[in-house]
Image (cartoon, rainbow, N blue to C red):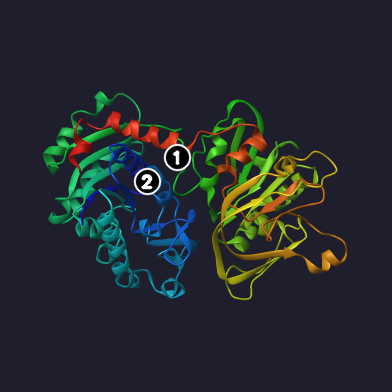
Amino acid sequence: MTAKCIMVLGTTSGAGKSWLTTGLCRYYARQGLKVAPFKAQNMSNNARVVATKGGQGEIGSAQYFQALAAMAVPDVRMNPLLLKPEADTHSQVVLMGLVDAELTALPWRGRSVRVWPQIAAALDELRAENDVVVIEGAGSPAEINLSSSDIVNMRVALHCNAACLLVTDIDRGGAFAHLYGTWALLPDNERALIRGFVLNKFRGDAGLLAPAPQMLQDLTGIATVATLPMWWQHGLPEEDGVFDDRSVAVGLVTKTVAVIAYPRISNLDEFQSLKNIPGVRLQWVRSPRELAGLTSTDWIILPGSKATSADLDWMRSQGLAAAVASHAGRGGAVLGICGGLQMLGEALIDTHGIDGNAPGLGLLPLVTVFAQHKTVRHTSATFAPLKTSASRAWAALGGVLVSGYEIHHGQTAQHPAMAAGGDVAQAVLPDSLGWCNAAGNVLGVYLHGLFEDPAVLQALFGANAPTLDTVFDGLADYIEKHFQAGVLASLV
């Protein structure tokens, strides 16, 4: 094993582990080192398609972006276990990129013995192939109710003797108590791995922090090695949850893009680029009131969902289904992506207990049948010309070659009875990947990643968003500026 391992732990979820891990990956890669990210277990419905030994599989989006930041090829070993929540008490288990039905059925604590050997093997392989492995923890390492079955925090750190940084969100308050309490709950051999505390999301005069950092060091023997100021627009998609409700358009607002934020929204990170398009306001919508001000030139997007039928029920209960249909009826643009495409059809049929049966929104004459096998693959395709009687939002996509990825159980096709009656959706992408209504304002596609494709951004907005490399370099610059001199070098 040649790689030095650096691990980013957090006092809580949302403390800044993913952000800091990504920045460290780019920082060390810029030092000429061969770097790989790693997270033993991620719980997220944001996933990306990467290569596996036998084909293609899924890892968490955070590790995908971390790999790109590290200038490495994303690899399923970088996130060997992915949990995709389908309900408050149930998650689909993805092991080494592939859905594992047997593990999915096991209780939470019953999985650790089964999966740890593959997690350790994946980490060891990355250690053997790289100079540095930057590891992200999950939640807090002081979850003492889960320590006996831990496979993602201190068990990983001890396995590779990682140099650990413990980061906390000072904007929430109680940061010093979080740091001290986390340290105090760890046994001595785990405390010995912590090399520094990091205060994240700080606002105000850093001089007012004294004497707390020194007092904390006197209690623990661990220095506070960085105070990172609050940075709202760093450009990295959040790992989970609806990111940055403070989103504002760059310049005068000419178009609002309203994304329906249902409870089991997935792959929302693909909309990050829309925040950087001049004149575009990205709005996360949870009620009909938030759609009331939309005009016919504004868009509604139905994103991916990990529980399409349940999220459709939620939309109806909130009055959002009727509001979306009303917008489409006025000629407003509606886009459904993956689960959102399935919602736009007439019906969802589930004979295998994958997602559930449900009536669709009826905006496209399609029907979706859920298959036991999950489609997971990279895909490139060219949009056919959209046959519309008027200039519509999606007509600009005609002839554009797009690249993206698919992650879905549903298989969608024309509704047989409606097609027999002449009500047929326009097939705008090959291989049942996309359809549009006759008017040209309602579009559904299975491809994730449209708004990460420069050709799509140019066609729809005439604009280019900042590249991910620009974002990663900005993160590395920020970390280098705010860490104490010599600390980052000392970790490797």
Question: Which residue is tagged 2?
Answer: 18
Q: Position of residue 147 (x, y in %)?
A: 25, 62
Depicted 162 relative to depicted 461: above or below: below
Q: Position of residue 385 (x, y in %)?
A: 76, 46
Q: Quadrant of the N terminus?
A: bottom left
Compared across the picture, whether 414 is left or right of 195 comes to: right
Compared across the picture, whether 177 is left or right of 20 comes to: left
Amino acid marked by disc 2: Ser
Instruction: Identify the mark nearer the N-term, 2 or 1.
Output: 2
Question: Which residue is tagged 1?
Answer: 236
Compared across the picture, whether 93 is left or right of 326 comes to: left
Secondary structure at badge 1 equals loop
Near mark 1 (Cα within 10 A), the count class, few <14, some 14-19 or many ≥20, is many
Q: Quadrant of the C terminus?
A: top left
Q: Position of residue 18 (x, y in %)?
A: 37, 46
Of 309 and 50, the residue lying toward us:
50
Q: Is residue 491 at least partly visible in the picture?
A: yes
Of 351 and 32, the residue lying toward us:
32
Depicted 388 relative to depicted 356: above or below: above
* Real-space CA distance between mark 2 and mark 1, rounded to the nearest whole angstrom: 10 Å
Q: Are marks 2 and 1 in contact (CB under 8 Å)?
A: yes
Secondary structure at badge 2 equals helix
Q: Position of residue 260 (x, y in %)?
A: 61, 48
Q: Residue at x 71, y 48 (%)?
A: 324
Amino acid marked by disc 1: Leu
